[in-house]
């Protein structure tokens, strides 16, 4: 079957293209908010959610993050933003318009930690010498294949493909080949 990849700069653009019928499927975080517009297969990959702290940070553990005076950066409107607004009781959640700005905020001392999935955190850490991703996790982001609403008849076939790709190791091999760090198993 012919295949034409279509690239987008932001996940919001991918989701809009799905809603408009401009793309047939994507692999993304299968969040409840996205499930309003996208039908998902069972999860095929999990990625731990965590925190990145700058060099010489006094924050050593996950428990050290939720304290008064700690500012935690998140991408504005993302799933970490919405979740941590509910979950953090003492730290302040500070939204950022982009990952680039978040790295600048962390380096400039405007936030004490940045929260998102560990695949992204490890990439950010590679760009910020001396920073570190904390051990442990505050959740898991599950990724699945998503198709536009209104195409439910295709979901069993797409679901069977997704299950085979996961169970036969295709997803794990692809993640390993891409150097994806912070993955977690999904059942």
Image (tube, grey):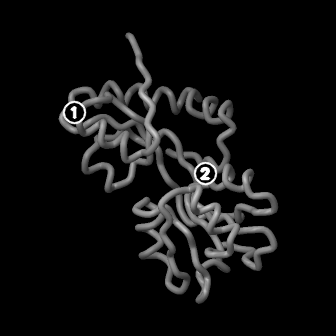
Q: Residue placed at 55% from the left, 26% from the top?
A: 168
37 or 20: nearer the eye?
20
Position in image of residue 121 (x %, y %): 64, 55
Q: Residue placed at 43% from the left, 60% from the top?
A: 79
182 or 167: nearer the eye?
182
Q: Residue placed at 67% from the left, 46% from the top?
A: 181
Position in image of residue 48 (x %, y %): 58, 55
Position in image of residue 40 (x %, y %): 34, 41
Q: Earlier in the sequence, mark 1 or mark 2?
A: 2
Q: Residue furthest left?
A: 150
Q: Determine the image quadrant of residue 113.
A: bottom right
Position in image of residue 151 (x %, y %): 21, 31
Circle 2 SS class: helix
Q: Does 15 sit above or below residue 94?
A: above
Q: Determine the image quadrant of residue 42.
A: top left
Q: Residue furthest bottom?
A: 68
- Kindly check if marks 1 and 2 are in contact, taking CB atoms under 8 A apart as contact: no
Left or right of 184, for residue 61: right
Left or right of 176, for residue 56: right
Point out which mark residue 120 bears.
2
Q: Cα distance, mark 1 to mark 2? A: 31 Å
Circle 1 SS class: helix
Q: Residue placed at 65% from the left, 50% from the top?
A: 182
Comparing labels 1 and 2, the label whose residue is closer to the camera: 2
Disc 2 packing (10 Å; few <14; some 14–19; many ≥20): some
Left or right of 142, for residue 105: right
Point out which mark residue 152 bears.
1
């Amino acid at each position: 079957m012919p295949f034409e990849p279509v690239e987008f700069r932001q996940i919001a653009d991918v989701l809009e293209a799905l809603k408009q019928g401009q793309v047939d499927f994507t692999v993304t975080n299968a969040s409840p908010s996205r499930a309003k517009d996208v039908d998902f297969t069972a999860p095929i990959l999990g990625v731990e959610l965590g925190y990145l702290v700058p060099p010489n940070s006094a924050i050593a553990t996950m428990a050290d993050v939720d304290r008064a005076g700690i500012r935690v950066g998140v991408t504005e409107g993302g799933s970490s933003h919405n979740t941590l607004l509910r979950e953090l009781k003492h730290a302040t959640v500070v939204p950022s318009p982009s990952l680039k700005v978040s790295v600048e905020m962390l380096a400039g001392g405007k936030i004490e930690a940045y929260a998102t999935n560990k695949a992204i955190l490890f990439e950010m850490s590679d760009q910020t010498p001396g920073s570190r991703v904390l051990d442990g996790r505050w959740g898991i982001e599950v990724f699945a294949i998503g198709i536009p609403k209104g195409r439910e008849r295709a979901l069993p076939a797409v679901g069977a493909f997704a299950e085979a790709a996961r169970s036969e190791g295709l997803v794990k091999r692809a993640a390993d080949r891409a150097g994806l760090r912070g993955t977690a198993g999904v059942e």
